[in-house]
Structure formats: C-alpha cells, structure tokens
C-alpha cells in the first residue's frame, strides 16, 4: 500500500448519520494534530449478544475487550477518541453528535492488532521465498489478462506520467492480484482500532499518529464523496481498492482516469491505473530511466557496507560506489544509485544498484523486497504477453528497465 509523506499523514451506518457528516463544511486535514497515546483511556465493553459471547481478551494497553466476533467496544468512552472528535469538530466542522453516532457503531478489531504486529526478529529475511510468493504462474496469467483488457488505459498512463505500463501492472498485481484480493475489513473499524490501540512496539506513538491522520482522512473522504464511511472496505490496515491506497493517499494522489466525474479505486481499474502512475510520478519517477542493475561487492574492500540502509534515495555516483568496492558493469555514469541488499536466508545475498525509480516504488511500500518484486512481476507479465504460448514465471537476472511491449 502507498505511504503518504510525513507532513501529509491524515484519516453512519444510517443515511441520517451519513448526511450529517456530508453537510458539514470541508476543510483540509492537519495530519499531526492528534498524537496522544491511548494509555489511560476509559473503555466500556458492551456486552455482546449471547450467540457471539466469547472469552474476554486484553488489548495492547492491557484493557479488556470482548473477543471476536463480539467486538462491541464503546469508543465514545475512550478519552483519546473524545479528543479526536473535539479536533474534528473544531478543525473540519463535523457535527459532534454525528461523530458520536459513527464511533458508537465502530468495532474494535483484534484481528487488525494481530496482523499489524511485526514478524519475529529472529527469522532471517529470504528474498527468494518472498519473490516466489509474487512471481508465479497464476499471478502472471492474471497480469496478462489485466494488461490485455486495460492496455489502452495503461498506455495512456505511461504517456501522461512517464511510468512504464509494466510497473503499473506489477504494483496492482502485487497488491491485489488485479483486484481479486482487495480486503473485506470495514475501514472505519480497522483504522480506529489501530489509531487508538496500536500494539506495543518501538514505533507505537508514531504509528498511532499516522492512523489517526488516516482516520481523519477516512471521515473527510466519506464526506467529500457523499458516501457512508462504513461502506469503505479494505485491508486490515485500512488500504482500499485495486491499488490499496490509504484514505490519505486517495485524497491526495488518486485521479479520475476514466473520466466519469468521480474517483473510485474500488470499482474502476482505470482509475487505479492512473492513480498508481500519478503516485509514482509525484514520488520521483524519472521517465525513461531503468529501475535497477545487478551489482557485485568486493571481499577485500568492505567500505560498501557503509552504503547500505542510507535512506530511500539514489545518491551515490558510480565513482563513489567503485571506490567503496561496488561494481556494476551496466550502470551508466550519469545516474545516481543506492546500494540494495536482498538477503537470502542462509544463501548468498543479492546486491543491486537501485535508481531513483527503484526508490520511487519504495514510497509505495518501504521494502526493497517489495520494490524488486514489483519490477520483476511487471517484466514477467510483459515477457508472457510477447510469448503467450509459454508464459515465464520469472524475470532474467539482468538490468530491470522498461520493456518495449505494445499495449
């Protein structure tokens, strides 16, 4: 899913509540205004119906809530939720009673807490295993079908934004298998849970601030689009539609690419295509440049180790890389690069030089594995379209750059 920039982080069931929200004046969100933690918040657990009653679980802050599926928590009794409502009323002109009604219907999702927790730190990273999840025959065939169906829109997005068709295809394929797995969590439930009870991790406060911004954007998006906020469905983290945009990214980067007068990433693959291309263009995609080059690192000059994990940007010249013990025969001298390490568990690590375009993809998801899988899936789909009788399930280990495929 795409990640908004730090200063751009932002986020009833009844028709009456939806109309009350939509009637309030629209104002731009202020992403970092609500950053308090959820400790000490008063929480009231409504008794679930007998058929849904299960054992009581503990939240990340030690408070008790009913276990799924009876997750009926009265968010209106949480102090931090009350503060958030105050800010929404003051900053964005929402009706307080309407917001109280919304949060009265919002459920606590223990599943979101479980799924958002980071993987155990003692498990080694394995690029080969990660790659196998996304570069497979099923996803490639689906990508070919998607490209064949929406080739005109893909070509138009490439011409307008400079992002190759295969990269757009790669992102939508990795994110949702071309619309097949968009998620069925109520976005209000998922984001509210994470905004006020994020798991105890070193980044807990920052992550709760992020999700409170996305909660603000969820309510603003619903008001601006004149839709019920509970109609929004997505991932356990609140990402929506074919490209899995967070609500803040929808408001800031999504485009009406099919020209029907509205932006709909849930039901319009064409809007998804244009929105992905626009997002990457805004985040540094350079028209016509490659994505990555395979590299080798020296064993007798290990200065290259200091070039790893130096931020999501291409900042080193070929001369600087060579002086540090990095070589890449195909890398052009006029570009800048970042050194990428793709760890393979107990096997040898792969090293690559990522261009500005590689790091543009990492703004969508801050993972080297993710960015490389997007590039390789796109290449594999492009190759399969050129050889429909024998689709490939992998990309060659050479320069990752745009193919010259036809729409």
Image (tube, rainbow, N blue to C red):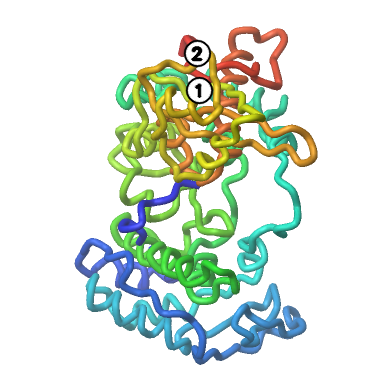
Q: Secondary structure at mark 1?
A: helix
> Which quadrant holds residue 356?
top left
Q: Describe residue 165's horizontal placement relative to residue 387 as left or right.
A: left
Question: 76 above or below 407?
Answer: below
Q: Position of residue 315 (x, y in %)?
A: 39, 34
Q: Position of residue 352 (x, y in %)?
A: 57, 28
Q: Neighbour class for label 2 at 10 Å: few (<14), some, many (≥20)?
A: some
Distance Cα–Cα, label 2 vs label 1? 8 Å
Kindly check if marks 2 and 1 are in contact, taking CB atoms under 8 A apart as contact: yes
Question: 127 above or below 137?
Answer: below
Query: Label 2, on which residue?
Result: 403
Q: Position of residue 341 (x, y in %)?
A: 60, 36
> Which quadrant holds residue 134?
top right
Q: Describe residue 277's horizontal placement relative to residue 93 as left or right.
A: right
Question: 226 above or below 3?
Answer: below
Q: Decide which of tag 2 and tag 1 comes sooner along the chain.
A: 1
Q: Describe residue 67's horizontal placement relative to residue 154 as left or right.
A: right
Residue situated in front as seen by the camera: 376 or 158: 376
Residue at point 35% right, 39% down? 283
Q: Position of residue 153 (x, y in %)?
A: 40, 23
Question: 207 above or below 349?
Answer: below
Query: Label 1, on which residue?
Result: 166
Residue at point 43% right, 88% down? 79
Q: Secondary structure at mark 2?
A: loop
> Which quadrant holds residue 265?
top left
């Amino acid at each position: 899913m795409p990640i908004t920039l730090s200063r751009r982080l932002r986020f009833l069931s009844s028709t009456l509540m939806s109309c009350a929200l939509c009637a309030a004046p629209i104002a731009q969100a202020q992403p970092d205004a609500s950053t308090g933690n959820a400790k000490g918040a008063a929480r009231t657990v409504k008794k679930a119906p007998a058929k849904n009653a299960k054992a009581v679980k503990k939240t990340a802050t030690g408070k008790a809530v009913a276990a799924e599926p009876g997750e009926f928590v009265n968010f209106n009794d949480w102090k931090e939720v009350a503060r958030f409502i105050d800010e929404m009323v003051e900053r964005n002109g929402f009706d307080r009673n309407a917001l109280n009604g919304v949060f009265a219907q919002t459920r606590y999702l223990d599943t979101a807490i479980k799924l958002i927790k980071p993987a155990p730190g003692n498990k080694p990273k394995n690029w080969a295993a990660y790659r196998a999840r996304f570069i497979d025959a099923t996803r490639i065939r689906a990508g070919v079908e998607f490209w064949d169906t929406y080739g005109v829109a893909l070509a138009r997005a490439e011409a307008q934004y400079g992002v190759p068709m295969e990269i757009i295809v790669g992102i939508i394929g990795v994110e949702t298998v071309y619309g097949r797995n968009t998620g069925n969590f109520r976005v209000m439930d998922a984001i509210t849970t994470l905004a006020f009870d994020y798991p105890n991790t070193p980044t807990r406060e920052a992550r709760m601030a992020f999700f409170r911004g996305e909660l603000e954007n969820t309510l603003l998006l619903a008001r601006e689009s004149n839709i019920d906020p509970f109609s929004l469905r997505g991932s356990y983290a609140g990402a929506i539609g074919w490209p899995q945009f967070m609500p803040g990214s929808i408001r800031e980067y999504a485009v009406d690419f099919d020209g029907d007068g509205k932006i709909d990433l849930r039901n319009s693959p064409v809007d998804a295509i244009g929105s992905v291309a626009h997002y990457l263009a805004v985040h540094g995609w350079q028209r016509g440049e490659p994505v990555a080059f395979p590299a080798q690192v020296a064993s007798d000059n290990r200065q290259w180790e200091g070039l790893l994990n130096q931020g999501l940007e291409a900042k080193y010249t070929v001369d600087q890389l060579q002086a540090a013990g990095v070589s890449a025969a195909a890398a052009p001298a006029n570009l800048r690069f970042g050194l990428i390490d793709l760890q393979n568990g107990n096997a040898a690590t792969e090293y690559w030089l990522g261009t500005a375009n590689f790091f543009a993809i990492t703004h969508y998801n801050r993972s080297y594995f993710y960015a490389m899988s997007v590039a390789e899936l796109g290449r594999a789909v492009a190759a399969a379209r050129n050889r429909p009788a024998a689709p490939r399930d992998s990309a060659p280990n050479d320069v990752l750059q745009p193919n010259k495929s036809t729409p």
